[in-house]
Amino acid sequence: MTNSSRSAVNFDGVKSEYIKHLNLSENPKSNDALFISDGNDLVFVEFKNGFMDSAKKFAVRKKIYDSVIILTDILNMGISNLKDHMQYILVYNETVNAEEREVKNKKSYVQPSESFDNFAKIISKQAKSEYVCFGVKIFENYCFKNVHTYTEKEFEQFLTEN
């Protein structure tokens, strides 16, 4: 979902190495990538190409928790020290989500429309804050300094600026 040439760590691979000798009954989940921003923050990135229904939202939250636990253990650093130097970005395919919204029945419909997202982004910008969708804002100031949800275009812009 990005054409960036920025170097990043395949965090799925890090997780695989981390759990290799743990003999777990269930494997933890992990974010897709980890890179260092120009401001020297660690940045977790998760790419989501499909419709963000409630099951996928839950899976994203599990990936966040598991990835943070793995990274804090690897770095031998508590979350209170690490969170001040970490950001999280969920990159989603705006087109897929817009198309899928039209075919889902109303009972399983769990996310705002594209129009709502655009309106919320405008209002948030006016309020000098950032609109974060899919319920991941709860991790800001808890696990991460900043939490973002970006479309592919917004993520490309973030990468050029950071």
Image: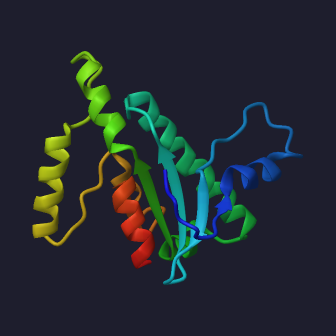
Residue found at the very far front of the displayed protein? 3
Which residue is drawn at the image coordinates 74% and 64% (left, top)?
Answer: 74
Q: Quadrant of residue 52?
A: top left
Q: Position of residue 43 (x, y in %)?
A: 53, 67
Query: Could you tell me if residue 17 is visible in this image?
Result: yes
Which residue is drawn at the image coordinates 42% and 75% (left, top)?
Answer: 160
Residue found at the very far bottom of the displayed protein? 39
Q: Quadrant of residue 93?
A: top left
71 in relation to 56, above or below: below
Question: Which color scheme did the rendering employ for the protein?
Answer: rainbow
In the picture, measured across the screen, residue 149 lies left or right of residue 80, that is: left
In the picture, measured across the screen, residue 104 lies left or right of residue 140, that is: left
The mark total stands at 0
Which residue is drawn at the image coordinates 48% and 62% (left, top)?
Answer: 143
Which residue is drawn at the image coordinates 64% and 56% (left, top)?
Answer: 69
Q: Position of residue 45 (x, y in %)?
A: 52, 57
Front residue (pair 152, 36): 152
Query: Could you tell me if residue 110 is visible in this image?
Result: no
In the picture, measured across the screen, residue 16 lies left or right of residue 21, that is: left
In the picture, measured across the screen, residue 28 lies left or right of residue 148, that is: right
Q: Position of residue 38 (x, y in %)?
A: 51, 82
Residue found at the very far right of the displayed protein? 21
Q: Position of residue 91 (x, y in %)?
A: 43, 52
Q: Quadrant of residue 29?
A: top right
50 in relation to 153, above or below: above
Front residue (pair 71, 161): 161
57 in relation to 106, above or below: below
Q: Quadrant of the C terminus?
A: bottom left
